[in-house]
């Protein structure tokens, strides 16, 4: 897979008093994109509930490059930046692009999988391997030891 992306809409409620995108909206868009990817590849909330596991985030960081304003056309993508070979721990990077080709922000999250019954980190079920193996990878992708 070359790219996974979604078009997102800038709503009036997304703007701050300076009439550009509030910082927290970037994080919401990242979560939206990740969930869309998981859903599209069959790893939805129902499956996770049934198998008693779910994703958790350790870190979320956004580097803001260009402001986004009302009326901008915005796309967010998703790529795997690094991961353990069993996908138990991973980092996903999002690029937020406005008006076709202007990189507005880079959002990076570090996460893992949790056993929901034991409330402990876990190696994920086979479905996670199948789904994450299809995730687009950055040019600098690396396997973690």
Image (cartoon, rainbow, N blue to C red):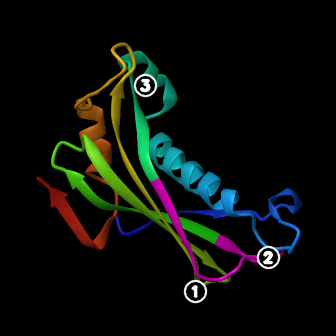
Q: Main secondary structure of the magenta part?
A: loop
Residue at mark 3: 47
Q: Is residue 126 placed above or below 32 in the rendered structure?
A: above
Q: CA distance from mark 2 to mark 3?
A: 37 Å
Res 27 → quadrant: bottom right
**Residue at the (42%, 37%) spot, across then down:** 56
Residue at mark 2: 69
Q: Is residue 143 placed above or below 104 in the rendered structure?
A: above
**Residue at the (15%, 48%) spot, across then down:** 85
Q: Mark 2 packing: few (<14 Cα in 10 Å), some, or many (20+)? A: many
| Element at label 1 | loop
| Element at label 2 | loop
Q: Residue 136's spot in the image, x, y percent?
A: 34, 63
**Residue at the (67%, 72%) spot, across then down:** 74
Q: Is residue 104 placed above or below 2 in the rendered structure?
A: below
Residue extending farthest to the top is 117
Res 48 → quadrant: top left
Task: Tell whether label 3 touches label 2 (CB within 8 Å).
Answer: no
Q: Residue 93's spot in the image, x, y percent?
A: 42, 63
| Element at label 3 | helix
Residue at mark 1: 101
Viewer-nearest of labels 1 and 2? 2
Q: Residue 32's spot in the image, x, y percent?
A: 59, 49
Inspect this view and state whether residue 30 appears. Answer: yes
Chain part drawn in magenta: 60-74
Report the number of numbered marks. 3
């Amino acid at each position: 897979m070359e790219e996974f992306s979604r078009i997102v809409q800038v709503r009036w409620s997304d703007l701050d008093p300076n009439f550009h995108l509030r910082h927290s909206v970037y994080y919401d868009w990242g979560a939206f994109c990740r969930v869309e990817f998981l859903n599209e590849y069959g790893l939805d909330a129902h499956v996770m509930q049934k198998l008693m596991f779910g994703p958790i985030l350790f870190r979320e960081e956004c580097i803001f490059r260009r402001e986004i304003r009302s009326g901008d056309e915005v796309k967010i993508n998703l790529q795997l930046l690094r991961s353990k070979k069993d996908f138990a721990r991973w980092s996903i990077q999002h690029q937020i692009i406005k008006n076709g080709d202007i990189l507005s922000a880079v959002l990076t999250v570090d996460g893992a999988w949790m056993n929901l019954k034991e409330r402990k980190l876990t190696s994920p079920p086979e479905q996670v391997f199948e789904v994450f193996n299809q995730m687009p990878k950055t040019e600098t992708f690396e396997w973690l030891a």
